[in-house]
Amino acid sequence: MTTKLTKESTLPLPNSSLSIPCLGFGVYQSPADVCNKSCTTALSSGYRHIDTAQFYANETQVGEAVRNSGLKRSDVYITTKILSAGGSVDKSYQKCLDSVKKLDGEDGYVDLFLIHSPNAGKAAREEMWQALLRAHKEGKAKAIGVSNFGIGHIEGLKGLGDVWPPHVNQIELHPWCQQRDAVEYCHKNGIVVEAYCPLVRNQKADNETLVGLAKKYNKSTAQILIRWSLQKEWVTLPKSDTPSRIKENGDVFNFEISDEDMKALNDLDEGAGGAIVQAVTNS
């Protein structure tokens, strides 16, 4: 990425005047009693994008942190995800409204609403997408997208409403799982790619290549992974509940990884076998 990255950097959403902050703060497995504090630390450290989900059971705490941050609601980008279909479009839509209420009150909105997973099958995907289309049309979700979707899943949403392609596809991405076919398809269609698990849950902190680059740039291994992901032009969602690490993970804008070192990290790709959560299915 040649454009100079800053904490304020954004990516444009397809077929929209909206954009999304490149650096986000993930709250997966952040317990309710900790989540509020972690989000408060992140927001005070300069993060302006928080990524939660119904599955995480901490939407209420995220909403509280945003409301109590002293920031304008319009200055914080909130993403959440619908976990499962309700059994009808109306019931799925109600699930979306429940999330919006937890995050931003009765008359609020979320900036981005995603389908969390394609795994429940075609009918469930279509029902949830119709619910998101309604949320988008009624201003409850400024943008809508998907998570863990492969190429076929995204193609399957064509013709279901007036939003296609989805604005975002959030998938597992780090040097060991680069999901190149799905990423190429998304980039070709203007879909913003979001990287979850960018830190590989610290499972690769001893990797020789990674450790060597951390020493070379005088950065933590986590900072190298986050910077690599940002330079790939992905929205990157590091997660931590340790205040010092939350701050450190956001401090990645005062250095740039060289093309040669980007390639060294690119060469670590293990394909689907490198996934620690879920590689997408592209058929």
Image: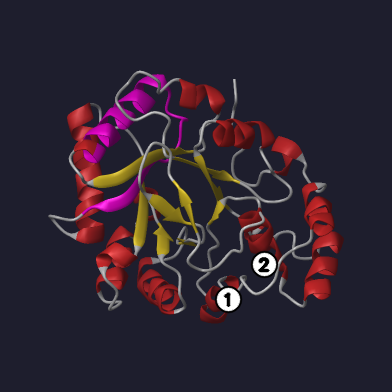
Query: Which element carries disc 1, helix, strand or loop?
Result: helix
Q: Which residues are magenta?
A: 109-136
The N terminus - image quarter: bottom right
**Which one is nearer the viewer's eye here, 129 or 35?**
129
Image height check: is 207 above or below 217? above
Cβ–Cβ below 8 Å for labels 1 and 2? yes
| Residue 116 visible to the viewer | yes
Q: Residue furthest front?
A: 3
From the viewer's perspective, is 249 left or right of 29?
right
**Which one is nearer the viewer's eye here, 103 or 263?**
263
- The first of marks 1 and 2 along the sequence is 2
Location of residue 221 (image quadrant): bottom right
On the image, the x and y values in percent for residue 140 come to 22, 46
The count of marks equals 2
Residue sitting at x 53%, y 64%: 239
Marking on residue 245: 1
Return the residue at label 2: 222
Q: Is residue 134 magenta?
A: yes
On the image, the x and y values in percent for residue 10 come to 48, 57
On the image, the x and y values in percent for residue 35 come to 39, 69
On the image, the x and y values in percent for residue 36 come to 35, 72
